[in-house]
Amino acid sequence: MYQQDWAFGYEAYLTNGFDNSITTNTENRTFLPASKNNKERFEESSNGEPLFTGKIAVRNQNIGELGLSYMGGIYNTYEDEGLILDEPRRLDVFAVDFNTELPFSETYIVGEWAWVFVDVPNTFTQQYGEKQSGGFLDIVQPVIDKSMFGFDDAVFNVALRLESVDWNVGTFNETGGNIGDEIWAVVPGISFRPTYQTVFRLNYRYQEQTDILGNAPAKTSGIEIGFATYF
């Protein structure tokens, strides 16, 4: 839907949902990506309940785009051939994202923040969080935009990425102290785009990760090299 400088969009999907591996996984935490290992999700639902995913977005040509997203549904196998195994347990994810390009410098900025709510069985320990949150912010600045190395529209960029995830938002029942299990990272880098759909990246990553008890964070750093293209 368009009106002068404004555009409005929406999308919605019903798909097979997650499964019990959200809370029964080798990460020993509430971990949504664990369900990716179950290839049978593409053929069969773990509970017969659809997962709803939807997004609405509004964009102004002079300001940028703001999006609101939701994903939710029953994730666990609560019944098997008429035998009740557990009560239905929900997973709900809310997210907000924004992107814009500064006209005076062509700086591209994109970010997203998400909140996750999971109904975890009370038989699990507190290391399995019922609330999670996290997000990122990318800032990309073109510094050279001209014909290079035989490519007419090549672009050389410098970039900065900020990341943060709290795997377990909340406090311990016994002490009231904050539950740790957090990670944040700073990732400066450079990239070269010979064409719009191909990019070479070189990043330096520094991150600090805190365990569930909030002990002194483990600090790591390293070099990341990447390549991506679309055909």
Image (cartoon, helix red, strand yellow):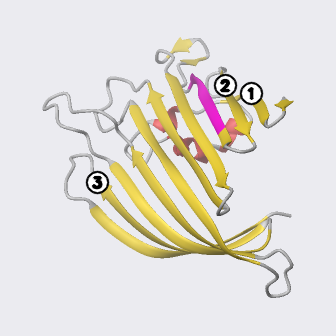
Q: Quadrant of the C terminus?
A: bottom right
Q: Residues within 10 Å of mark 2 (few under 14, many from 20)?
A: some
Q: Is residue 207 above or below residue 191?
A: above
* Residue assigned mark 2: 52
Residue 58: x %, y % from top left: 71, 33
Query: Which residues make up the magenta segment?
Result: 66-74
Question: Residue at 64% of width from left, 58% of height from top?
Answer: 108
Of all residues, the one furthest to the bottom in this rendering is 149
Residue 97: x %, y % from top left: 59, 40
Question: Residue at 80% of width from left, 88% of height from top?
Answer: 149
In the image: residue 127, left or right of residue 91: left
In the image: residue 123, left or right of residue 69: left
Q: CA distance from mark 1 to mark 3?
A: 36 Å
* Between 169 and 1, the one nearer to me in the picture: 1
| Quadrant in the picture for residue 146 | bottom right
* Between 29 and 149, the one nearer to me in the picture: 149
